[in-house]
Amino acid sequence: MPTKHSKKAGTMGSEALTYHERKALGFGTARERLGKDSLGNFYDCRLTLSPAVDPVASPSGFIFSREAIIENLLAQKKENKRRLVMWEQSQAIQLRKAAERDAVEKEASLLAFDRRNHAGASETLASQLRDAVTEEAEALMADKHTTRSVNNIKDNEARMVGLKSFWVPSQSKEAAEVVEKPDGSTRCPASGKKIKLKDLIQVNFTPVPGGEPGEYMDPVTRDPLTNASKLILIKPTGDVVFRGYLEDLYKTRRGVAPYCCWR
């Protein structure tokens, strides 16, 4: 016997689907529990997503393979140089356009002055002529045609006077391409904070004696390190120890711990 909602759905073939039917067809939010293999290990590189080779850590506690992070920082420097060249070219283009615009306005003013004083044109007509010449010159520059000389304005004078169209090309706005000046700094690919090559800290894991590759332990307590462990990297030596043990130790001695929090 058909369900109740199918009787009120309308024509055949357009019946509404229940929640379980839509879910069975793949609609809705897909939910899946991630297993252990889907999560990275604490000794994995944040760039290669594989066990770090000659591991180093950023001041924020992210670990990288030395070769991978050096290549990344060098690529950032190269990209910063490219963006700087683009910004300088953009600035040069803006200065050139400003100079051309000033030359056009000056020539238009001289032309309007000549027509007003020698041709008997009224002040209104001279002002309209000056505005028309300026708009035409800006339209030519907007079309990316270089004005080779301000004398080209005189060649377009007759055509601009007879222009009857209400639409002026120079009035159509275009989105200006804005090129921001790069700051020139390199950033950590994991945290986004500014970082330099000299800020990287050497990491020295203590392997478990007789253990498999990737098995490490605390050099003090000799307990194995796991992905659930809260670890601390000691900057002077590069050793990785349990956070709780080191914090208790420095609280007892009332000292300041020279470490960066890692996990």
Image: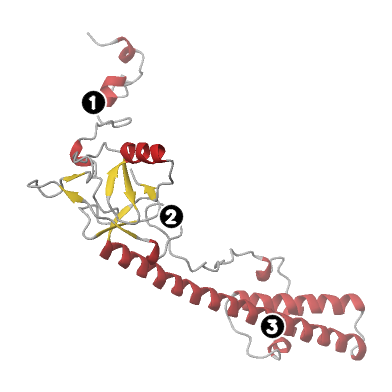
Outermost left residue? 210
Give residue 249's position: percent from left, percent from top: 35, 39
Q: Which mark is residue 121?
A: none
Say how many tags the image has: 3
Residue at 68% in and 89% down: 152
Between 187 and 259, which is closer to the camera in this rendering?
259
Residue at 36% in and 13% down: 8
Q: Are marks 1 and 2 in contact (CB under 8 Å)?
A: no
Give residue 183's position: percent from left, percent from top: 52, 67
**Residue 5, above or below 204:** above
Residue type at tag 2: Gly
**Residue 164, above or below 256:** below
Q: State the CA–CA distance, disc 1 to disc 2.
A: 41 Å
Residue at 45% in and 70% down: 80
Residue 3, quarter of the rendered image: top left
Q: Give the colouring mode of the picture.
A: secondary structure
* Residue indicated by mark 1: 24
Residue type at tag 1: Ala
* Residue indicated by mark 3: 99
Quadrant including the C terminus: top left
